[in-house]
Each structure stands twice: as structure tokens, then as C-alpha cells.
Amino acid sequence: MNVIILGPAGSGKSTLVRSLLHFLKEREYDVKAVNLDPASPPIYDAFKNVRDFVKVENVMRRENLGVNGALIKSMDIALNYIDKLIVNSDFTLYDTPGQMELFIYLNSGIEIARKIAESSLSICVFTVDATVAVTPENYVSILAQNAVVSLRLSIPTLTVFNKVDIAEVPTVEDVKRKLKEGGTLSELMEGLLDFLNLTTANYRIISISAKNGEGLDDLLGAMNEVFCSCGDLS
Ligand SMILES: Nc1nc2c(ncn2[C@@H]2O[C@H](COP(=O)(O)OP(=O)(O)OP(=O)(O)O)[C@@H](O)[C@H]2O)c(=O)[nH]1
Ligand SMILES: [Mg+2]
């Protein structure tokens, strides 16, 4: 089963891979982590590492590109090696770069996700930084991004609010109420929730701290629910 960890820069994807790896190993699952971020050396024990094939800093130098252009070019190169990076295990956790355009409209990220999904049952975990999602406007914007990514990749997606050790996740009702008070975006929010129901798996908010492990049992439960609803796991 593949678990593709997606989300904006700094939302805690790599930290989540590290803590989920530990959490699942403790429960005696066969679990492996794969680093698909050519810009970052993994902060966990990576079974496969895209940086063995392409490193952003080398592409920057060689192609005379800035960091974002070099990342896009690096993902194009990574696509050629994706078969070498896909692993079969109880859970394979794929860490990805935070540049969301890669998974919304650029061929490399979308193809990489498609190849992974072809190889075995797969879900995406869209990681949201709860410290950023505190205002209703940010909350709506981030969930809109989440909805577009899941729609584009056509892979069942769970939304995970990370960093709850330092920030409180607002409830949908709170957000709706605040939006109505402000008179802004409330209709968009209502429509967006319907959209999310169509595009995300078993839509509910999962709150975790990748740092201290809080909520990982809930995340595992939600992952199993998705797998069960996608097919027979026996
Ligand atoms: N307090 C707190 N900090 C966290 C948590 N998860 C991640 N962080 C911190 O957030 C920062 C970014 O974490 P990363 O795991 O590197 O985030 P990322 O999404 O992989 O970032 P990119 O790969 O650059 O997109 C680091 O300083 C982490 O220590 C959490 O649950 N709680
Ligand atoms: Mg990272």
C-alpha cells in the first residue's frame, strides 16, 4: 500500500514520514520510506532516495537555473527513474516536494503519482500546517488547494492538519460562522465542502502532531478505512 505524503512547503511532510515510519514499525508492519524530494536529504531512514539519481543543487549549477526551475527540471529527470523508486511493502511512505504546482498541472509530478498508484493500492495524505490554517480565509484556500490536488491526481485523499501541538484546528462550523460574520467567501466555503465530499475519501479532518506523534492512531484508522473502501485487503 502506497501512502503519498503531499502538502505545501513546510507543512511537515518529511517530519510526518519520519514519525509514521517509527509508528508503523513499532506496530510490526513492514514499512518503508521513499524520498521523492530532489531538494532535501531525507531526515529519516530512506529505503530509496531520488537524490541518488538527481539533486536540485547540481541541476541549478549545470543548467544555470533558479531553485524553483531546477526543482521542476529535477522532477522531470526523476520521472525517468520512478520504476527504481517504487517499493512494495505493507506501507510505503512517499515524501514529496512542497511545490504544489508539480501535482496540479505539471506533467512530472502527476505522472510520478500515477505510476505509484498503478503499482499498488494508493492514497494521498494532504498535510496542512494548522498554524497557517487559523484564519477562515487561509483555511478555505488550503482546502481548495487540497481539493484541486485530489481531483487532479484521482487518488483517494485524506486531509491531515499537522502541528496541533502548537495550533488549534478550527471546526468547519467555526469557519463557516466566521466567514458569515465577515460576509466573505461563505458561499464559496459551502460549495467547496460539497466539492471536497466528491473529491476526498471519507472526508473528515484528522488532527495530528508529526512532532510528538499525537493523532497518528487516528490517521492509521482513516488510512485503513480508505483501503477497505477501495478493495478487499484480506
Ligand atoms: N511544532 C511542530 N512543528 C512541526 C511539526 N511537524 C513539522 N514541524 C516543523 O515544521 C518545519 C517543517 O517541517 P518539514 O517536515 O521539513 O516540512 P516539509 O513539508 O517536509 O517541508 P518541505 O519539504 O520544505 O516542503 C520543521 O521545522 C519541523 O520541525 C509538528 O507536528 N509540530
Ligand atoms: Mg520535506
Image (cartoon, grey):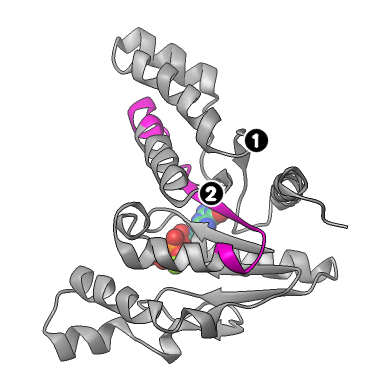
Q: Which residues are magenta?
A: 117-140
- Hey, which quadrant is residue 46 in on the image? bottom right
Name the residue tied to disc 1: 202
Which residue is at a point 28% across and 15% down the rendered structure image?
184
Is 98 located above or below residue 18 in the figure? above
Q: Nearer the viewer, mark 1 or mark 2?
A: 1
In this rendering, position of residue 164 left or right of residue 193 = right
Which structural element holds mark 2?
Answer: loop
Name the residue tied to disc 2: 163
Is 180 located above or below residue 188 in the figure? above
User: Disc 1 or 2, which lies upstream in sequence?
Assistant: 2
Do the residues under discs 1 and 2 have CB atoms within 8 angstroms?
A: no
Image quarter of the C terminus:
bottom right
Q: Position of residue 158 (x, y in %)?
A: 59, 45
Nearer the observer, 4 or 214:
4
Q: Residue placed farthest to the left in the image?
A: 64
Q: Amino acid at mark 1?
A: Asn
Which residue is at a point 50% across and 18% down the rendered structure image?
174
Determine if residue 52 is in view.
Answer: yes
Q: Position of residue 25 (x, y in %)?
A: 78, 71
Q: Amino acid at mark 2?
A: Lys
- Hey, which quadrant is residue 76 in on the image? bottom left
